[in-house]
Amino acid sequence: MPELHKKRLVLGLTGGIACYKSAELLRRLGDHGATVDVVMTDAATHFITPVTMQALSGRPVHTDAWDNRQPNNMPHINLSRGADAIVIAPASADFMARLVQGRADDLLATLCLARTCPLILAPAMNREMWDNPATQRNVRQLREDGVIIIGPGSGHQACGETGDGRMLEPAEILAEIIAFFQPKVLQGKRVLLTAGPTSEPIDPVRVISNRSSGKTGYALARAAFEAGADVTLVSGPTALAAPYGVERISVHTALEMHQAVMSRTGEADIFIAVAAVADWRVANPAEHKIKKTDNGRGVPVLEFIPNPDILASVAALPDGPWCVGFAAETEKLVQHAEEKRQRKGIDLLVGNLAQDVMDGDDTRLSLFDAAGCHHLPAADKLSAARRLIGEIARRAPQRHHSA
């Protein structure tokens, strides 16, 4: 089921070159199941035409407060009633100032003033306009009024300058909107999470690793962000992009992952160990590439030593985060997973059969705790991650950080 299935949104556009991004955002919202009504200010129509937005939404575009297509000639009332949210992207400095003042001098401003649903703004303006004290006062007031402000980003601007004020990219705004509608079961929590494989060098060009795409761990990081958590992802080598809103720390070896995790446990409420960490590393990696002899003989002799047990190290901390472990087994899942949970000394372990889910987009998870084994239904990895985050939130104890 698309994440925005049955959601009705009003997408507002104000004047700014970032309007070209709004067309892509509109298309993506539709792809994810949303029904979108577009409202444009007169200034916005100078940057992109209503015809373009109508073609992408499949619905009439509204620009006039006196539009008689609406019942009783009140589009400012009818458009917001029944909407799940109003999203203004781009939101100009002038429009935000008018919102603070409670102005109702065009259709979009009047609609926002008369709304009964949440209002989300994606600002877009020159860096000096964004940094101006008047704009910053308006931003603070809008937030105090309950308006949600996402971004802006930083980077190259159409004026040729570089700095804060760029509207977020369509994919980032989409991620924020999807996250907005997810239950905030981890609001205020700090989640530390590992994902992907580790890569243990044999020589400068050869490695020993575990099979892991990182998809489950990255889906969990995204789901934790959507649930309101501040998420740090310590990731081994993968081909995946960092989930929006998540801080990613890239590592290669188990020793690097162990160091990165242990240096951040004091800040975390919950630790989720998803990474497929190599149990052993080569004790004598070569300084230079090992050469193969002409006759193919002379196979190198490798000596292995154990890597640190990251999950056990965190679980043993006297005031550490609440820990969740993962176990990918190939047989006797219930027996091996429960033995691992007890051996690690943790309350919750998530297990599955590796051959059923390896490299795929779907998964089947089983939860192991003191009450026994609980099987979750098969699902795509993001849906399964959201379900698991809900289970973690229900079980995790409260932990309060000192200021």
Image (cartoon, grey):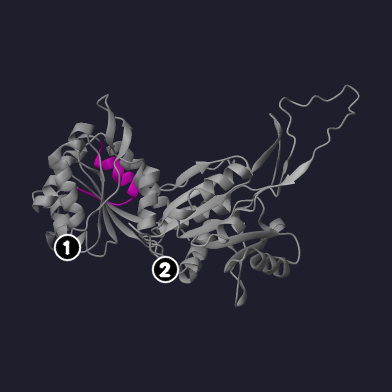
Q: Name the quadrant of the C terminus.
A: bottom left
Foreground label between 1 and 2: 2
Where in the figure is residue 333, as x and y percent of width and height? Answer: 71, 66
Please tell me which residue is depicted at 42% across the width and 68% down the height of the picture.
398
Label 1: which secondary element:
helix
Q: Is residue 231 left or right of residue 238?
A: left
Where in the figure is residue 185, as x and y percent of width and height? Answer: 40, 65
Comparing 237 with 98, the one in front is: 237
Extent of the magenta region: 48-62
Q: Is residue 47 left or right of residue 184?
A: left
Choose the circle earlier in sequence order: 1 or 2.
1
Is 52 drawn above or below residue 225 in the view shown? above
Residue type at mark 2? Answer: Gln
Label 2: which secondary element:
loop
Q: Is residue 50 magenta?
A: yes
Question: Which residue does the numbered mark 2 point to in the structure image?
Answer: 398
Marks 1/2: CA–CA distance: 51 Å
Residue type at mark 1? Answer: Pro
Where in the figure is residue 307, as x and y percent of width and height? Answer: 68, 47
Comparing 131 with 177, the one in front is: 131
Q: Residues within 10 Å of mark 2 (few under 14, many from 20)?
A: few
Residue extending farthest to the top is: 294
Question: Residue 71 bears which disc, if any?
Answer: 1
Is 47 drawn above or below residue 96 in the view shown? above
Write down the quadrant of residue 227 in the picture: bottom left
Write down the quadrant of residue 362 in the picture: bottom right
Comparing 240 with 318, the one in front is: 318
Where in the figure is residue 115, as x and y percent of width and height? Answer: 18, 61
